[in-house]
Amino acid sequence: MMKKTGFLGALFLLNFVLTVNAQPSGPVDHVSTLVGTLSKYELSTGNTYPATALPWGMNFWSPQTGKMGDGWMYTYTADKIRGFKQTHQPSPWMNDYGQFSIMPLTGEPVFHEDERASWFSHKAETAKPHYYSVYLADHDVTTEITPTERAAIFRFTFPESKNSFVVTDAFDRGSYIRIIPEENKIVGYTTRNSGGVPENFKNYFVILFDKPFTYFAAVKDGEIANGESEFKGNHAGAIIGFSTTRNEQVHARVASSFISEEQAMLNLKELGNAGFDEIAEKGKARWNDVLGKIKVEDDNIDNLRTFYSNLYRTVLFPRNLSEIDAGGNIIHYSPYNGKILPGYLFTDTGFWDTFRCLFPFLNFIYPSENQKMQEGLVNAYKESGFLPEWASPGHRNIMVGNNSASVVADAYLKGLRGYDIETLWEALKHGANHVHPTVAASGRTGYEPYNQYGYIPNDVKISQNVARTLEYAYDDWTIYRLGKALNKPKKEIEIYAQRAMNYKNLYNPKRKLMAGRATDGSFSDSFEPTDWSRDFTEGNSWHYSWSVFHDPQGLIDLMGGKKEFVNMLDSVFIIPGSRGMKSRSMIHEMREMQVMDMGQYAHGNQPIQHMVYLYNYAGEPWKSQYWAREIMDKLYAATPDGYCGDEDNGQTSAWYVFSALGFYPVCPGSNEYILGSPLFKSVKIELENGKEITIKADQNSKENRYIAEMDLNGKKYTKNYLTHGDLMKGAEINYRMSQIPNKTRGIEEKDFPYSFSNEK
């Protein structure tokens, strides 16, 4: 009976998959949400999980293979599923909040995650953004999920059984559950979190079934209480049951809210009266609309799969934490002060990662979404007194920098409007000269010595001092640029222009790299540029010395000119990755750099990701073309091990998406995109303003990675960058690609991208 029922269930599943993926197909059909899931604590190939969600959705859903509370909730090598979890986790390092899970069973009513777990196979698993399905072998049940922003429908296909059950697990550390049999309903809340929340934090949920219960039990801290309907304690759960016929489908409509149980019921209305297939089709259409803003043509199906899988990850975060009340108003629960307040709020993004190209990508392709996010930043500042640098859901004390300045400035400088930029201006000035009283990552740790010395000395007991200084200098430049655009008085903004040059204070001329410096101005003779951490953040001097986004020409001058600068860039790929591996205890970023066999180039972490584009500033753009394509070809794939380190909230994915188009925003705030090597033969980009960009690369191939010639709007184009203004007008970009680098193109000073030194 089990085999027959399972076979029929599989036939049904195949029929549904064919239905949701019917012609005409769209870009979502190229996406696998399993990319990056072949990861573990010791080695990341993405550190992702298969998020079934809508773009920027409040709630994601994921199968759970890891134990309760394990940041690695789903790993590709696992063979058992413990439940299907509503998750808000941005990364395993940040862990989760507001999570609960649902799991179908047959046989005996059990609750413990090990007892209810079922074997599964990837061969009986479908993982798409809008649809997830898997066959649970131990229970002979197929589970399918399709989401909206704040709700989802589960479809369970049960075998013939008098003992079919669904478990709801509200997790430990404080939860509540209530079963309402007469309404086929379960309600409850979970409080489990990993920090960044007020004391009144709850995620309220409601689950509505379409089949009456013949059995129910509350679960009280692991004890199953048959016939009882309510429990509040450390670890609440519920089990409901019914008899099912062979291949009977039972649906569960699920929604949640950070505001109230009543708001969760309102959020459930997102589903309307639509059935599972209709919601799945709507989800597919939504994904095709968002992903379809970029239409790619290529003979290599693997390139298409990699591109759209990366684009999917690029538009997952930051998540929209906002909800819609009964009057149709946008409201949100504030993780900063615990109040219910009007307006948008977004979260689950670390600006240390995402300022680099994720937010510039939103400004390029989805500016209306980032407009909402900027409004959310206004609200975050009003509610907490600081802009978040790492929000999940509120302020989290992790990473360095004050890169909210870049996120705010780049949006405004690229034309976004419709939010309170004056409040954000005050927020940037405040954050540059203060530090959050309890969360040192928000504001600027070390702002006082930074302002006093022009750098953070390495003997004032402030860690990661070089990393902080370099990022603060760039952030000061973005504040200056925004101040100029807002017509702020010179006496107010000139200090930020001066501090933007602070990077020069950490340049060690003896080693031609950035290094820690003492209060007396001395550099240590024991400095080793391959040594990890200490003065740096998750990296070393070879990674961080290029973090002068706003002034590469100034860095070129420090290093002794273009030739020496290029030699130093080249050296990154020559010095063995094993160097420095004994400088501290092993962390996964070190190993991920080593195994990629690209010298000191550590693409798996963010600080160096722009570095290959810097050849354009020194008159050797063909090296940027070579290395951009090398990284795309070697370090990315549409496979479970498809990344070379942490994916990190869309940043590493956005790098690929930009680079595949043929350009990259080295310096957010400059309104320039620096040229690399276009991956595809043909691309069409639909801009929100109604304009279109077409990119054609004649004779493009794996071997032909070099730009022989380039036209912009029918005219020969020799610059090593494109401007945001030119692209926003609509553009026709034509490349002729070659196997041989053109060493006469892009070599004149007039063709080089922006540097602050050239402005002053």
Image (cartoon, rainbow, N blue to C red):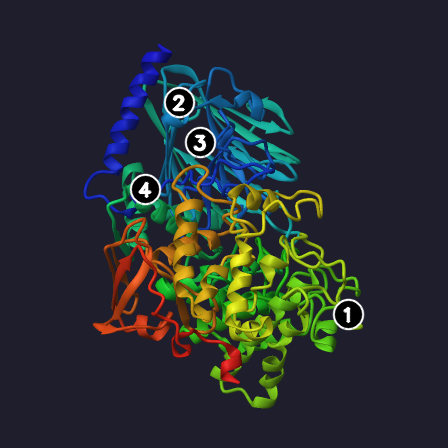
- Tell me the distance, in whole angstroms, between the alpha carbons under discs 3 and 2: 25 Å
Which numbered disc, 3 or 1, marks the residue closer to the eye?
1
| Disc 3 target residue | 182
Measured as percent of width and height from the top left, residue 294 is found at 29, 56
Tell us which disc is closer to us: 1 or 2.
1
Judging depth in this view, the residue of 70 and 108 nearest the camera is: 70
Q: Are marks 1 and 2 in contact (CB under 8 Å)?
A: no
The disc labelled 2 sits on which kind of residue?
Val
Reading the chain from its start, which is encountered first: label 3 or label 4?
Answer: 3
Q: Which mark is residue 656?
A: none
Q: Secondary structure at mark 3?
A: helix
Task: Give the distance between the C-alpha atoms of the residues marked 3 and 4, in whole angstroms.
Answer: 51 Å
Question: Mark 1 against mark 4, which lies toward the viewer?
Answer: 1
Query: What residue is pinned by disc 1?
Result: 522
- Residue 141's label in the rendered image is 2
Label 1: element kind: loop
Residue 334 location, x and y as percent?
57, 59
In the picture, measured across the screen, residue 523 lies left or right of residue 227, that is right
